[in-house]
Every structure is written in structure tokens, then in C-alpha cells.
Image (cartoon, coloured by chain):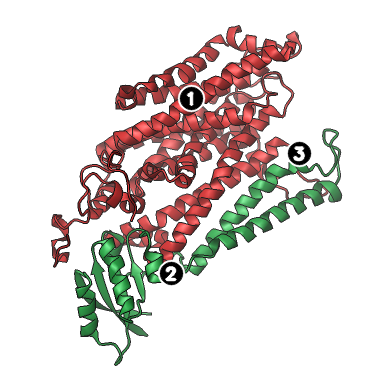
Chain colours: A red, B green
Amino acid sequence: MQHVSPIREPLVTGGKTYHDVTEDVCRQVEAKPNARWAAAFAVSLVGLAIFFYSVYRTLWFGIGEWGLNKTVGWAWDITNFVWWVGIGHAGTLISAILLLFRQKWRTSINRAAEAMTIFAVICAAMFPVLHMGRPWLAYWVLPLPNTFGSLWVNFNSPLLWDVFAISTYFSVSLVFWYIGLIPDFATIRDRATGPIARRAYSILSMGWTGSAKAWSRHETVSLILAGLCTPLVLSVHTIVSMDFATSVIPGWHTTIFPPYFVAGAIFSGFAMVLTLMIITRKTFKLEDYITLEHVESMNKVIILTGSIVGVAYITEFFIAWYSGVEYEQYAFINRATGPYWWAYWSMMTCNVITPQLFWFRSIRRSLTATFIISIFVNIGMWFERFVIIVTSLHRDFLPSSWVMFSPTIIDIGVYVGTIGLFFTLFLLFCKFFPVINMFEVKSILKSSSEVKHHPNGAMHGTNKDSHTNTHP
Amino acid sequence: MTKKFVLGIYDDEDVLLQAIENVRAAGTKIYEVFSPYPIHGIDDVLGVKRSRLPIVAFFCGLFGMSFALWMQIWMLGFDWPMIIGGKPHIALPAFIPVTFELTVLCAAFGMVITFFIVTRLRPSLKVNVFDKRSTDDKYVMAIEVKEGVTDISALNNLLRSNGAIEVNEKEVIK
């Protein structure tokens, strides 16, 4: 039997029984969608329509629909790509790294955070694929024997590493997520009343019965997958940062990039998890499972990673000066005081200053403050990528090629569109999948629930028929 | 063929663990125990052997690593050598990221596919759940009834005296 110190705050409040957990989580899967969900879904579908229109314009008329020019060949597309991939990192961090560290508070948020990871990576993948211009030839990035002589892909290129990193990350995260969903699908299957629901969840649950042997293997598989995902998640953003760091562009050619990008990814990912969780717990009345304790824990991660990011910004500046390289120095002076000064200082304000407010306990435990700061961090991290990419490129080595970048309406449309795509997927997930990992919450209920006595519902009304004798 | 089972329903994991020990000590073979979540320590009392899936993962990972290294060395070093950035044809440090990713990919997929096969998990409409409450809030201990050998009423008493809240009989088509 696990033991948790009594001075720790309970992870599940409201004196829930096992059956209550099942009821609370299955409710929105089984009930008709509520008005808030329907309204949010309608707005997301508008976003999705914008996405399809912008993609249609990009594909029909070509990349010229975007605001790219000869000097700035990468701008919003890669900014959005890195932003979305970064957001994805929190899900894997919560489900894999916190599992290895035995942080039990992850149990009620890991499911939704992993879903967020998968949908964020889907959104991220749209940008490099669209930027190819001819996405139907996307398979050219794979090492396939081809009809042009057996000319192979360049394994020395970080862009190719990215192909392998992102696709491995996506497929392994998807499998990890699905493995965790199987027992919960079985719970929904065994409660399902309608024939369609019963069939759908039967297929999804793959005949899970919850036998001791299956659980033993399930736990082993989860642990090993967590062990594999931990270096994987760190490798993904490392490789993304190498897209920049292995080039010789002043402002990009820095060894600090991999750890700085990984910290930034976790930072932005936790901000997005908070944004989503604060809305989800309210909409689906899950306040007993996602408590202020959870919000506070996530805010602590935000202070840590936000401070690492802040130190990295200052280090970059210092090293640019210390290196004595004129071009490197100019790249940084230009960031802070050049024509894109507003982007730089937005980034500094949102990423370095606002998260420091979380040193105050009252702010860490305030939902409104957390929600606002999480939005600030999301914006700040978008600006970080924009600053790194556009300010390093727009003043090229020859002043004759100095230009400014301005996005077109299609640039904005693709970006807003992926947000619509993300929320469409996330809302469908909320409706049809259990948003909280039921079996993991049940496994901590006895040790970390608010009510310390028998949590199994001898007092509970709905299973009166089943308790013929009582236990102490 | 139908098989008959006696099901002991429990509603507390500690009572269940004690019951498993007592039932096994009484010389009764437990067919299977179903629970809504993994119970800490059930493997020892039930005698479930430690899973060998990590070994599968290791060898699949080893295969992924060897395959990735062979693929890159053969493609860029032998099949179509090109000078890229003045580096040697077989630039091993640059091959590490792809090697790492394929190691993880093969280890994860190899292990998960093996897990599905050995646990007999596959998309199917037919599900043999002994008691539907075992995916909600109850623990179910199933004991197989052998015609003419098993004394059902003695079994009933054994389970009840060890804290079962209900004892049912169920026939399952295998």
C-alpha cells in the first residue's frame, strides 16, 4: 500500500469514491453536448474553414501568397512550426518525465495534456509540409529508392533529422496516449447503452478486461514508453533548434540553442496546458480532480523554465558582446533597438517579467491571474520564435538586401486556421474521449484523496445492491 | 465450449489482496483477477511473473539502431557517395540523430505490438467481461469450476469468509 504524507494537499477533493470518478469523467462522453461546448465547437469550425481556405490559396497560387521575400525566406511558417512543436512538449513531459519522477499530481492532467501534444504536433507539421509548395511530393523527404538514380536524402542535414524526429515523436506519443486510453475505453464500453457507442468503444478498447496479468504488462509498457519518451522529447526540440544552430547566420549560430529551446518548449507547453485546463475544469465541472494544487504545481514549472529562458536571453546577449564578432553583435543590437524592437520587447516582457509574478503564492493559486499569465506566455513564446527567425534574417550581410517582413492575410489565415484546427480536434477529444485518466486517478484515490476513510462507496447510493456486508 | 466460473466480488483492494493469499493457501487455483486499475503488490500474491516486455523493447531498439546506422552508412558511404560540406562520406556524428530516432521508434513499436499480441488485444466487437463492474469500482476474482471436482458451496463459503461481498456463477463461451 502506498503512503502519502498527511501534510500534503489531497490530489482529489470532494471525497470521491471510485464510482464517482467513473461517473464524473464519463458524464460528458455519455451526455448530449452542452451549449458551451457547442458554441466553442462552432467557433473552432470557423477557424477550420479559415485554415482550409488559406491552404487552398497557398496550394493553388503557390508560396507567393505568403509574405516571404528573397531575404526573409523563413518567417511565420517556421515561427508557427516551432511554436506548435514547443507547445506539444508539455504533454510528454507530464506523462513521461513526471511518471519517472513519480509525481502523482500528473494523473488527472496527463490525458488532456497528451491529447494537446498530439494535436499541436499535427498543427506544427502543416507548416513545413505547406512550405514545400508541392506537398504531394512530401514523400521525397524519406529515404526511398527513386527513379532519378538512387540519389538518397542528405543525412547530414538537420532538416532531415527533423523529419525523423517529428514523425517519431508523433507516432510514439500517439501510441503512448492510446495505451493509456485502452482501460478507460473499456470502462465506457461497459457502461454504454446505445448500440453505436457500445460497438465503437468495443473496437477502441480492443477487448480489454483488466486482468491482473494484463495490468502488470500494461504498467511495464507504460514505464518503458515513459523511459523512451523522456530522451525523445528532449531530442525533438534539440533537433528543431539545430535547424538554426548548425547554420552560419549571426543570431542563429549558437551552442546555447538546444537547452534554451527545450526549456522554452516546456515553458510554452505548460502555459498552453494551463490555458486549456482552466477552461476544461470549469466547463466539465472537474474542479475536484484538477485542483488549485495542480495549477500551483504547473505554475512552479513555469517559473523554473521561464527563468531558464530569461537567463538564456541574457547569456545570448552577453556572448554576442564577448565573442567580439561584429556581425553577431550587430544581430543582437538590431534585435533590441532595430525596427523589430517591439517584437523583442514584447518577448522580454511576456516571457521574462510576467512569469516572475508566480513567486507570489496568491498569484500562483489564483485562477484568473494564472489564466492571464498563461496567455501572456503563449504570446511571448510566439514572439520569441519570430524574433529569432525574422530579425536574424531581415538585415542580410549586404545592406542592399535589407528588407522588412510583413505577413499577408494568407499568412495570418494559415496561423489562425491551425488554432481552429487545434481546437476542433481538442473539443472532439473532450466530447468522445475520457478527458481524465480514470484508472490512474482511481489508483491514487486511496492514498491521496481528501477523505481518508474507505473510498469505495459503502455510503454511496448508486451501488446499494452490491454491499451485502461492510468493512471497517 | 462453455466454461463455468465462480466469481467473488470484492470492494476493497486490501481485503482482496488478503483474500487472494488465503484462497491460494487453501489450495484453490485462481483463474484470473480483474480490477479497474493496477493494484500495487497484486503480482506477488497472485504469482504473476515479471513481464519480459522490456527485453523485447531492448532487442527491437537494438535492431532499429543497427538498421539506421547500416542504412545511412550504405546510402551515403557506398551506394552514392557525395561530398557534403567537406565532411567525410561516412560522417558518423551527423548520423546520430536519425539513429537515435529510429532506435526509439523501433523499440516503442516493437514492444507495443508484442504487448498487443501476448495480451490478445485486438479490435473486436466480442468482449468477454466476467462482471461489468470490474471496469468501474469492483474487483472480481474468477475461479474455474471443474465438473464433478469443484465443490461450489465450499468455494462460496471460502470466498465469503474472506470478505467477498457477492459470489456469483457465470458460464463463459470460450
Residue lying at 60% horizontally and 55% vertically, measured from the top left: B107
Direction from residue A402 to residue B91 in the image, left or right: right
Parent chain of label 3: A
Could you say which is closer to the camera, residue A223 or residue B95? A223
Residue A408: x %, y % from top left: 56, 20
Q: Is residue A145 visible?
A: no
Could you say which is closer to the camera, residue A451 or residue A176? A451
User: What label sits on residue B48 in the rendered view?
Assistant: 2
Residue A124: x %, y % from top left: 54, 35
Residue beneath disc 1 = A306
Do the residues bearing badges 2 and 1 touch, measured as CB atoms within 8 Å?
no
Query: Which is more foreground, mark 1 or mark 3?
Result: 1
Q: Quadrant of the C terminus of chain A?
A: bottom left
The numbered mark, 1 or 3, whose residue comes first in the sequence reads 3
Few, some or many residues within 10 Å of mark 2 (<14, 14–19, 20+) = few
Residue beneath disc 3 = A156
